[in-house]
């Protein structure tokens, strides 16, 4: 039985599957990742990306933050790819119970997934730090320079988890519960190098841990099944 046939069998038998994904899920939609050869960490700026998208830098120099953020992290024209669409279909067929994602692009919801736990927040939610009015991503994108609240003039901040900020405790709790109760855990498009998110795998108690990635990960030795390649192209071959 091939790796793909094994994955098909396990999905057919699954009732509480969970998909845990990272940046590689969205690269096929044209959203760049951080750690590939062409990723954000390998491009040149006045400051390293991890400095620019930190909490302290955002407060210190919101202009420079938003120049980077709008150019490199706001991909509002991106559309769901084959991976997003197949995961939505698997959820609708009661094979998947939840999607846990490190991505902030909202493409899982755009594809139709219902239960999505966004560990790092979403570019589609933004709020005034002064009066807490909410704004969509288009408002941020349209703003000249730093987006300001149209009511009180306060600084608008994306509801994304910046460096130096903790993950949302409620989201983490729900993601942990979903993974701990899963009968199949598929991990795709992530280097599994970013903590605490990568540590979520440790909560899985089953024996059907599937890793789908283009390159090896630190968890390969613990996987029950490994598929190498583009996640959209592989999941597209799965029957629902």
Image (tube, grey):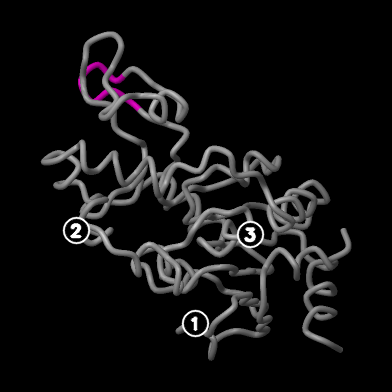
Q: Residues within 10 Å of mark 2 (few under 14, many from 20)?
A: few
Q: Secondary structure at mark 2?
A: loop
Q: Residues within 10 Å of mark 1 (few under 14, many from 20)?
A: some
Q: Earlier in the sequence, mark 3 or mark 2?
A: 3
203 relative to 231 in the view: left or right? left
Residue at 43 percent across and 66 percent down: it is 39
Quadrant placement of the C terminus: bottom right
Residue behind mark 3? 28
47 relative to 203 in the view: left or right? left
Per the rendering, the mark at residue 217 is 1
Residue at 38 percent across and 21 percent down: it is 134
- Residue 23 sits above or below residue 74 on the image: below
**Predominant secondary structure in magenta?**
loop
Per the rendering, the mark at residue 235 is none
Residue at 65 percent across and 80 percent down: it is 207
Contact between labelled residues 2 and 3, with CB atoms less than 8 Å apart: no
Could you say which quadrant of the image residue 180 lies in? bottom right
Residue behind mark 2? 47
In-front residue for pair 142/200: 142
In-front residue for pair 184/99: 99
- Residue 143 sits above or below residue 26 on the image: above
Instruction: Read off the magenta span.
Output: 127-132
């Amino acid at each position: 039985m091939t790796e793909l046939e094994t994955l098909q069998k396990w999905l057919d038998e699954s009732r509480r599957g969970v998909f845990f994904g990272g940046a590689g899920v969205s690269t096929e939609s044209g959203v760049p990742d951080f750690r590939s050869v062409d990723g954000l960490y390998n491009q040149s700026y006045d400051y390293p990306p991890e400095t620019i998208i930190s909490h302290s830098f955002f407060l210190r120099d919101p202009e420079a933050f938003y120049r980077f953020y709008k150019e490199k992290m706001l991909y509002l024209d991106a559309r769901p790819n084959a991976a997003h669409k197949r995961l939505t279909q698997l959820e609708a067929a009661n094979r998947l119970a939840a999607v846990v994602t490190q991505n902030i692009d909202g493409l899982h919801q755009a594809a139709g997934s219902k239960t999505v736990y966004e560990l790092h927040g979403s570019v589609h939610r933004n709020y005034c730090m002064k009066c807490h009015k909410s704004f969509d991503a288009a408002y941020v994108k349209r703003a000249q320079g730093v987006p300001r609240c149209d009511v009180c003039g306060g600084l608008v901040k994306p509801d994304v988890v910046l460096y130096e900020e903790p993950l949302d405790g409620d989201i983490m709790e729900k993601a942990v519960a979903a993974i701990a109760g899963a009968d199949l855990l598929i991990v795709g498009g992530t280097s599994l190098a970013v903590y605490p998110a990568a540590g979520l795998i440790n909560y899985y108690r089953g024996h059907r841990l599937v890793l789908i990635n283009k390159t090896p990960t630190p968890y390969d030795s613990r996987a029950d099944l490994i598929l190498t390649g583009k996640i959209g192209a592989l999941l597209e071959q799965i029957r629902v």
